[in-house]
Structures are given as C-alpha cells and as structure tokens.
Image (cartoon, rainbow, N blue to C red):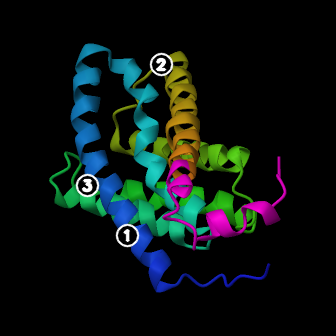
C-alpha cells in the first residue's frame, strides 16, 4: 500500500489534540515529580519517561515524518504556558527529546512502529534529556555510580513510560475505532516486524 509521507490536516489535528492532552499531563506530572523528589530523590528517574510519551503516541498513530518532534514541542509548549516549573527550558527539552525520537523513526524510514522501535524511541528521548540536565548543573556533581544509576533508570523509564505506554495507548485508541483512517490501523496488516 503506497501512502503519502506528507502530513495532512486530519493528522495535524490529532497530533495537536494529543499533544495538548500530554502537555496538561506533563504539567500535572511535575507536581508528582516534586513530591517524589522530596520523599525519595533518586526514584524520580523511574517516572521521568512520561515526559517523552507525546512523541511516541502521535508518531505511532500518524507514522509520518516530523510528527514525533512536532508533538513533543507542542506538548512542552502547553506545559510551559500552563505555568510549568521549568519555564522556557521546557521548550528546549521538548525540541531535543522530540528530535531524538524522530531520529529513531527516521532510521526505520517511518515504516516500522513495532514495540522494539517505540521502546528504542523512548530510550533515545531519555538519553537526549541527560546532557540538558548536565548542562543545567543539577546532575554534574553526582558520583560516577549515582550518575550511571540515574542514566540506567531514566532509560528504563523512557522505554516503559514512553515506549510501551505510548504503544498501549495508541492500540487502545485504535480498538475504539476512532483511528480507523490513520496509518496505525490501515497499514497494520501490511507491516512485518522489524525486530
């Protein structure tokens, strides 16, 4: 089945709607993050991956170039305008995390969105967020062991909360029938697993 790689209006609309929902969730997630950070500081890495889920859900549904990055930046923008605690740096995070996921999907030429691919995209977003945190100075003073632990936990969180959760949410939405005109549903039978 030959499909256009150009994002149409309907696909832009679902990307924007889901990005807005994720942006509001990101804002609320910041409060939970703060509570958990106060109680068990290192455990926050286990929940960090939710901040990458917008790019995974929308790219999984639309399956076209640019959607992962657009959705992550849009979600970051919504989080910021709601008064997110990280201000303008939220947009930097969104841009870099979205670009990392986008690179994974581009590496598979936007033709494979199986579990392994979306997990890899979630992990790529997680990996991309670490240098920003390092630059901002709050992880630079960690011991090597603590830094490695933080990285491993964040990668796992990206894999599970962005990759697996993003795919599960997309599949659940598809079962409702609201996504029947999107590539997620239309091309499912045409695609063979990449891994």
Residue 186, given in percent of the width and then of the height, sits at 68, 69
Q: Which region is colored magenta?
A: 172-195
Distance from the alpha carbon under mark 1 to that under mark 2: 40 Å
The first of marks 3 and 2 along the sequence is: 3
**Circle 1/circle 2 CB separation < 8 Å:** no
Residue 173 tag number: none
Choose mark 3 or mark 2, whichever is in front: 3
Q: Is residue 144 above or below residue 131?
A: above
Instruction: Name which residue lies at 58% across and 71% down.
Output: 182
Distance from the alpha carbon under mark 3 to that under mark 2: 31 Å
Q: Nearer the viewer, residue 64 or 175?
A: 175
- Indicate the secondary structure of the residue bearing disc 2: loop
Q: Quadrant of the N terminus?
A: bottom right
Residue at image mark 3: 79
Instruction: Name which residue lies at 24% across and 47% down.
Output: 27
Residue at image mark 1: 16
Residue 136 appears left or right of 34: right
- Indicate the secondary structure of the residue bearing disc 3: helix
Residue 97 lies in magenta, yes or no?
no
Residue 161, given in percent of the width and then of the height, sits at 49, 37
**Circle 3/circle 2 CB separation < 8 Å:** no
The first of marks 3 and 1 along the sequence is: 1
Residue at image mark 2: 143
Neighbor class of circle 3 (other Cα within 10 Å; few <14, some 14-19, many 20+) is many
**Circle 3/circle 1 CB separation < 8 Å:** no
Neighbor class of circle 2 (other Cα within 10 Å; few <14, some 14-19, many 20+) is few
Q: Is residue 44 above or below residue 121?
A: above
**Toward which corner of the image does residue 60 lie, by quadrant?**
bottom right
Residue 102 appears left or right of 141: right
Instruction: Name which residue lies at 61% across and 73% down.
Output: 65
């Amino acid at each position: 089945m030959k499909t256009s790689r150009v994002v149409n209006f309907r696909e832009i609309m679902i990307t924007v709607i889901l990005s807005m929902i994720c942006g509001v969730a990101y804002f609320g997630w910041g409060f939970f993050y703060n509570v958990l950070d106060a109680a068990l500081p290192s455990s926050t890495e286990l929940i960090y991956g939710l901040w990458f889920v917008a790019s995974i859900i929308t790219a999984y549904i639309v399956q076209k170039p640019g959607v992962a990055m657009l959705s992550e930046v849009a979600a970051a923008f919504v989080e910021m305008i709601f008064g997110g605690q990280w201000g303008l740096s939220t947009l930097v995070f969104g841009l870099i995390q979205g670009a990392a996921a986008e690179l994974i999907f581009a590496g598979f030429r936007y033709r494979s969105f199986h579990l392994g691919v979306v997990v890899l995209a979630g992990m790529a977003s997680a990996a991309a967020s670490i240098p920003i945190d390092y630059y901002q100075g709050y992880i630079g003073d960690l011991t090597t062991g603590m830094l490695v632990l933080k990285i491993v936990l964040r990668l796992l969180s990206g894999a599970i909360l962005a990759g697996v959760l993003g795919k599960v949410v997309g599949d659940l939405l598809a079962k409702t029938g609201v996504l029947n005109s999107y590539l997620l549903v239309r091309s499912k039978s045409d695609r063979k697993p990449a891994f």
